[in-house]
Amino acid sequence: MPRDERKTDDRRPRGSSSAAEERRLMRSTNRLDIPRELRRTIALRSAYDADAFGRLSERIARFLGTGQFLVYMTATILFWVGWNIFAPESVRFDQYPFIFLTLALSLQASYAAPLILLAQNRQEARDRVQYERDRDVDARTRADMEFLAREMASLRMAVGEVATRDFLRSELRSLLADLDLKSREDDRV
């Protein structure tokens, strides 16, 4: 069968030039029932992770709260002050009132405070979710305990109606005593 006499419902192998030609023709028409292929844009869209800055701020806040940071900061300040007091005057970069050091520490504090607050807010949100989960677990536990208490009460009531071991023993002893008495009477007769 020649190729141009094929019926339209015959399956063609994928990747053939005729299938690509059909796709091209379908794209060229502005049909509403066929979804358009995504077009590539010149500017690349960056995938922005909204929590990335929050995670970074938490790492920084954790580091700012360590003894290691305090040691580094103390060593830096001591080196700064020592250099600007004892170094030759030509290589000093911050004279006695240490205005540049004050500016650097103020800048560090102005960035550290909001980062710490952001980390605290994120921790507060996590704590709130954890508290809600704990409340749900507590409610389920309380419901389970109430159910078990009702079950225990019903079992106690049922046990009250059931013959206990001591009751059965006393009844069996009295029956044995009655049987012994009857057997003695039968022996006498």
Image (cartoon, rainbow, N blue to C red):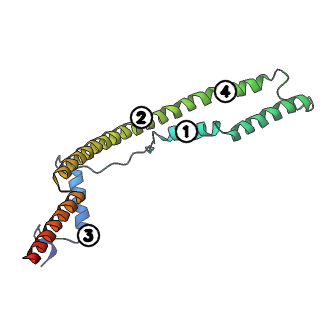
Give the amino acid at mark 1.
Glu
Label drawn at residue 107: 4
Q: Quadrant of residue 153?
A: top left
Q: Which residue is mark 2?
A: 128
Q: Secondary structure at mark 3?
A: loop
Label drawn at residue 58: 1
Could you tell me if residue 6 is visible in this image? no
- The answer to which of marks 3 and 4 sits earlier in the sequence is 3
Q: CA distance from mark 1 to mark 2?
A: 17 Å
Q: CA distance from mark 4 to mark 1?
A: 19 Å
- The answer to which of marks 4 and 1 sits earlier in the sequence is 1
Q: Which residue is mark 3?
A: 16
Q: Quadrant of residue 14?
A: bottom left
Residue closest to the far left: 189
Image quarter in which the C terminus is found:
bottom left
Give the amino acid at mark 3.
Ser
Q: Is residue 19 left or right of residue 58?
A: left
Q: CA distance from mark 3 to mark 1?
A: 55 Å
